[in-house]
Amino acid sequence: MEYIIIIISAIFVNNILLSQFLGCCPFLGVSNKLSTAVGMSGAVCFVITLATLVTYLLQYYVLVPLHIEFMQTISFILVIAALVQMVEIVLKKVSPSLYQALGIFLPLITTNCAVLGVALIVVTKEFTFGGEPHMLNLAESVVYAFATSVGFGVAMILFAGLREQLALNKVPKAFQGIPIALITASILALAFMGFSGLV
Amino acid sequence: MAVQSSFKNMVLCLLVICFVSSALLAVVYAVTKAPIEAAAAAKTNNAIAQVVPEFDGTPELSQINVAGTDYTYYKVSKDGAVAGYAIMAAATGFSGPVSLMVGVTADGIIYNTSVLSQSETPGLGAKCTEPAFADQFRNFNPAEKVLKVKKDGGDVDAITASTITSRAYTNAVQIAIDVYKAITTGAQPDAASGASVSANGSSEPENNGGQDNE
Amino acid sequence: MEDRTMSKLQLITKGLIKENPTFVLILGMCPTLATTTSAMNGMGMGFATLFVLVLSNMAISAAAPYIPDKVRIPSYIVIIAAFVTILQFIMQAYTPAMYETLGLFIPLIVVNCIVLGRAEAFANKNSVIDSACDGLGIGLGFTLALTVLGLIREIIGSGSAFGFKFISGDGILVFVLAPGAFLALGYLIVLFRKLTAKK
């Protein structure tokens, strides 16, 4: 039950893009075409889940026992950068077709704040899923990270679909590009606000 | 411009940068450690001073276990007699925990409350920090009034369109009252006293018609 | 790519209008949207980024000649992360209230594309002083944009400016919430384009 609450909450209620504003750069940058949006979402999903697993272990089995929590930011970003590199190399060897699909997005992900954001959220914030405020355990963290990245994908793909339609319309010159995308995102965020209070 | 990459100088370069950065961080950490702790202590002390009557000396930190959960509280005294307790309590609000510092005087009256942290929606639930709502709990006597929102048959006016936040705030205060009772009499709250310790009082079904969505 | 004859003053002022990171380059969207619920918060975030930008620009510009090309990006990220962590300590110690309000978005300065972007585009091929000026200019432009956006959202959303309330009751609440952030930024970019196009 608790996992279902985590999943619904992370995908719809607290959507990472539309209510927490993490990962806005790719949201605005690579959402012109549906196919690239799908590729980006897949890559992000993969990296967020993996990165959260590794940084969670790093936090509780290395940083906390050694009392060097102040190295949190620097070690997390290093782990993420290394992880992205590794995923790229492994993917190239193991599944060239998947690498073809996700490859070009991987280097961009290091500086996607959604990845570092989720990794930091799970080790710093108290959650209230199913009762009393508590810190997430390993399984909950991974489920939360995965659901969050699915939420990223949902918002990203919806938005790309809207923008593909938008490209066919006449937009006033000053609104072209980012401004009209932002206004579209605003309406999409309004729609997602309808989910609030669901959990 | 940059140096040619070879395996040796790449590793060396990264090592040097990591080492210098870590050393720098360790130094800054050592220098700012005391001020950071002082700032955190000042925050707690401010919250305590806000919620309890005038006292002398330093607040005495203790912990107590009530119904399976550990609660932190501070005992303050004036002229050797107990002046009151500042109790930290939290309950689930709309978008996360609402944590309060609740001051209870020696005779069981709520002196004042103060919000330690909350992540409620700005303009809606976040109004629980404003005096219009929070001042209702000033000098609130739980023996005379019912500590529930009016919708649930109590005496607390809920924030417009933010019943869940108001309920969470009220529940947190109720938890503090239960903790106070446990401190003074050692009594554990009886299960019949309603939504008290369960921290999540909004388990009953709601029919708000979508208006009170927070 | 930068004009060698550019004066220090020009380096600073170009970040304000011509290369404004928010309105023209559309970089660093996450903190821009997330922290501008009020003018003070926007300004705090702006100055926090400015601090990191100037110091990291200077450090990277000084270190760039000694860094092998292939490990350029990881090295820059470590340097930036170090300054961000230093900023975290300083803010925790001396402005704890602001630190708490901005929360997650302080460590996320590490992945702000503006900081890494300036390191790549400017600092690694210019002198330390020029890089400091560039960081200062871009940082001020960012601060200005965030303050203006925060001010607009605060005025419309809660009827106050810099915390000073001038109408009783509530404003149009949605402007302090997520959809309002997208909407306000969208229209602000349009306005900025109109104003700068006339000149």
Image (tube, coloured by chain):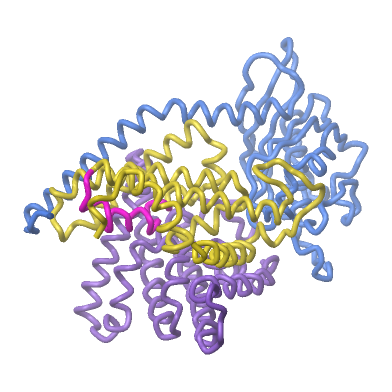
Q: Residue at x 24, y 50 (%)?
A: C5
Using the rendered view, name the quadrant where residue C28 is placed: bottom left
Q: Residue furthest top?
A: B79
| Nearest to the observer: residue B201 or residue C12 | C12
Q: Position of residue C122 (x, y in %)?
A: 27, 54
Q: Residue at x 72, y 17 (%)?
A: B55
Q: Residue at x 38, y 56 (%)?
A: C114
Q: Residue at x 45, y 78 (%)?
A: A31
Q: Position of residue A49 (x, y in %)?
A: 40, 67
As for residue B127 lying within the magenta part, the answer is no
Q: Is residue C120 left or right of residue A24?
A: left
| Nearest to the observer: residue A169 or residue A131 | A169
**On screen, residue B151 above or below A34:** above
Q: Main secondary structure of the magenta part?
A: helix
As for residue C119 lying within the magenta part, the answer is yes
Residue A6 visible, this orientation? no
Q: Is residue B36 left or right of residue B103?
A: left
Q: Please give the letter of the chain rendered in purple.
A: A
Q: Magenta residues, as a range?
A: C108-127
Q: Please give the letter of the chain rendered in yellow.
A: C
Q: Position of residue B39 (x, y in %)?
A: 53, 29
Q: Check the picture and name the quadrant holding the N terminus of chain A.
A: bottom right
Q: Chain B in the picture: what colour?
A: blue
Q: Residue furthest bottom?
A: A168
